Image (cartoon, helix red, strand yellow):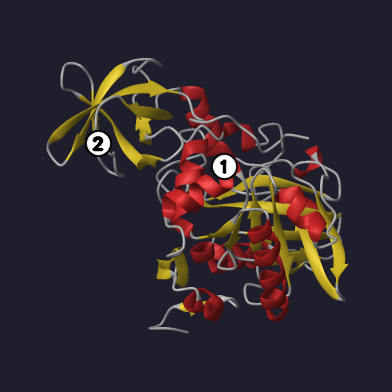
Amino acid sequence: MSDGLRTSPLHDRHVALGAKMADFGGWLMPIEYPAGGVIAEHTAVRERVGIFDVSHLGKARVSGPGAAAYVNACFTNDLGRIAPGKAQYTMCCDQSGGVVDDLIQYLRGDDDVFLIPNAANTTTVVELLQADAPEGITVENLHDRYGVIAVQGTLSDEVLGDLGFPAGHEYMSFVEVDWEGLPVIVCRTGYTGERGYELVPMWDNAGALWDALATAVATRGGMPCGLGARDTLRTEMGYPLHGNDLSLDITPVMAGAAWAVGWDKETFWGKEALAEQRAAKTSRLMRGLVVTGRGIPRAHCAVLDAEGNVVGEVTSGTFSPTRKEGIALALLDRSVAMGSQVAIDVRGRSLPAEVTKPPFVEVQTKES
């Protein structure tokens, strides 16, 4: 613990590297490292490879007879679409359709589902699952039981191969292996838009795995990367950040994430409200904005049309190191068409932008 903040099992390594540390979801995590900085780290992932400590992410397990069916009756996506050994993006909603959290569910079998929620929402998700769990179903909060290390970039397969890990398995699948006698879950997932993996070791084993991966990454021209680069990478892909682009006030329908809803399922939390909103077609929708002038949009900036009317609000904004221009995600009125010219009010300054559909860069996640 540091100033009331939780720390990852790799905290001392980040401090030794001189990382800039900051509060992220109640955890003291590395934002950037002095050897590179956000832009260099971002570029390393897009062009070569990078390694991230994302051990702040939550971990939970739902087990027992009918565990998968129970999870499927709670979260939005349909576990029936995937087989054991596969992972799936999903959302935990409240009865109004608001997003309590977005997470990845890993299907081990009919009686075993492993979950990775967001750091700040793990306890809430676990408590909701525990409150409704039928007899025989166990819901465990394993937040401090596992670390998570992401290897992301075009050379991620080579890095894993250097250490003897399996690589090249299908996108959104996972395998459980022993590495030098230590159990590790190797997931073909990530949050950068590049080919990559997320490795889940036991908490006490994370340091040894990080050291080995960091050495392999360095030999491939890569580097450790902080959460600053992770944010610019995910924004270029149009991936939502809970609390910004998804929230209790921003539903899957509004966020453009209706594809992660199993509309034909008999039930899931928030189904009735979401179905009504989907049918009404009146809510704002998430769009992309590409700045056509000089400036960087930020969250909560108003978006105006050509007549000066407020037609939306930026939810996430940043400078795109790949495009070398400002980009944003924004909730816009449905009347705002793709290709429209709008203005972003950045502290009283009008920043011209064009409405577009994310991602803002070429997608590499599913490359075989």
> What amino acid type is highlighted by mark number 2?
Gly
Q: Does residue 238 appear to the left or right of 61 in the view shown?
A: left
Q: Residue at x 67, y 72 (%)?
A: 211
In the image, 15 versus 61, the foreground residue is 15
Residue at which label 1 appears: 46
Report x, y in % for residue 115.
Answer: 69, 59
Q: Quadrant of residue 285?
A: top left
Q: Is residue 247 above or below residue 138?
A: above
Count of numbered circles in the view: 2
Q: What kind of residue is marked 1?
A: Arg
Residue at horizontal 45 percent and vertical 33 percent from the top: 254
> Which secondary structure lies at badge 2?
loop
The circle on residue 127 is: none
Q: Residues within 10 Å of mark 2 (few under 14, many from 20)?
A: some
Q: Is residue 238 visible?
A: no
Q: Position of residue 9 (x, y in %)?
A: 60, 78
Are the residues at dot 2 and dot 1 in contact (C-beta closer than 8 Å)? no
Q: Is residue 330 above or below residue 9?
A: above
Looking at the image, which is closer to me, 66 or 172?
172
For disc 2, the marked residue is 295
User: Disc 2 and disc 1: Cα gap in Å?
Assistant: 23 Å
User: How far across and how far down the image is residue 46, in percent?
Assistant: 57, 42
User: Which mark is first along the chain, 1 or 2?
Assistant: 1
Task: Look at the numbered disc 1 and give the secondary structure of its residue.
Answer: helix
Judge left or right: residue 215 versus residue 241. right
Label 1: few (<14), some (14–19) or many (≥20) C-alpha neighbours in 10 Å: many
| Residue 298 in view of the camera | yes
The image quadrant where one finds the C terminus is: top right
Q: Is residue 89 above or below residue 108?
A: above
Percent coordinates x, y for residue 274 in the rendering: 53, 36
- In-front residue for pair 68/41: 41
Q: Please identify, in this view, whether the residue under mark 2 or under mark 1 is nearer the observer.
A: 1
